[in-house]
Image (cartoon, helix red, strand yellow):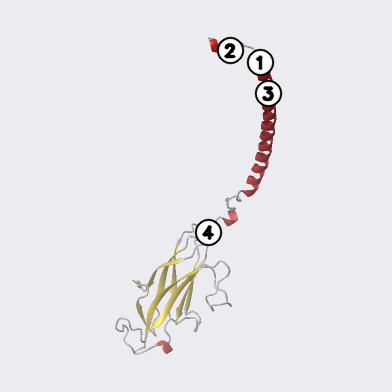
Amino acid sequence: MTQMSDLARAPRGGAMRNRAGSLARAGLARRVHRYAAQMMLVAGFFGIGVAACALPPSLTVGAEDAAVNSAPAITSVRVDGSELPFNGYVTFAVSSRPTMNVSLVDTDVNDTLVVRAFVDYDATNELAARSECPAAPSAVNPTAARNTNCDLRSICVPTDATSVPPYAPPGSLVGFHDLTVVVFDRQPLPVGSPAFQAMPAGGLSTTVYFHLFCQASP
């Protein structure tokens, strides 16, 4: 009760002066606080503007850019019904007319694929393909899986023939040629580097290899 009586008691002069000073300082503090708050609002406004400018562009892709270009793949190579192991050995007689069936996959379902077979093609020997066969998409329901047949009658010419046995000892490639099968997702350019394998911008390809023995005709 004594404390409540003290609170109700009128302050002395010094206390009034201190209270007035305190009120003045409190008023100034309130004005500073209001000014600071206003400045924070302004800064916040401009901060939002700056942040908006710094946001990354929309990641939404337009319809024309929606497809992601992917490389085609060769899943199997068969000759006259027999599947060839990749990097394995294959024998053709010079006088034979084998047919190569190539199974392909390309998630760009509307691409027309082109398969080419090369013999002894390398950076110092950019020789023309011995065979070429297209794999166009289905006009009705295009799918990622494709098949195409290639005529290999020119895969072994008389100058390729040797008398070395068709299967040399393991690790020996004497008498063997390099058979390179390449699938392109664009028609290769008629002129460009590497020759016969150069592609338009955005074109992709995949290659598989075999060891080829060209058997001389009996």
Q: From what the image shows, is residue 50 above or below residue 158?
A: above
**Left or right: 138 in relation to 173:** right
The label on residue 68 is: 4
Q: CA distance from mark 3 to mark 4?
A: 70 Å
**Disc 4 element:** loop
Q: CA distance from mark 1 to mark 3?
A: 16 Å
Dots 2 and 4: beta carbons under 8 Å? no
Note whether residue 151 is visible: no
Question: Quadrant of residue 91 in the image?
Answer: bottom left
* Mark 3 Cα shell of 10 Å, populated few (<14), some (14-19), many (≥20): few
Question: Quadrant of residue 152 in the image?
Answer: bottom left
Which residue does the image show at 61% across and 11% down from the upper left? Answer: 8
The label on residue 12 is: 1
Q: CA distance from mark 2 to mark 4?
A: 83 Å
Which comes sooner in the sequence, label 1 or label 3?
A: 1
Q: Nearer the viewer, residue 36 or 78?
A: 36
Q: Which residue is mark 2?
A: 6
Specify the amino acid type for callout 3.
Answer: Leu
Dots 3 and 4: beta carbons under 8 Å? no
**Disc 2 element:** helix
Q: Position of residue 173 (x, y in %)?
A: 35, 84
Dots 3 and 2: beta carbons under 8 Å? no
* Mark 4 Cα shell of 10 Å, populated few (<14), some (14-19), many (≥20): few
Q: Position of residue 135 (x, y in %)?
A: 48, 67
The label on residue 23 is: 3
Which comes sooner in the sequence, label 1 or label 4?
A: 1
Q: CA distance from mark 2 to mark 1?
A: 12 Å
The label on residue 89 is: none
Dots 1 and 3: beta carbons under 8 Å? no
Q: Position of residue 84 (x, y in %)?
A: 35, 73
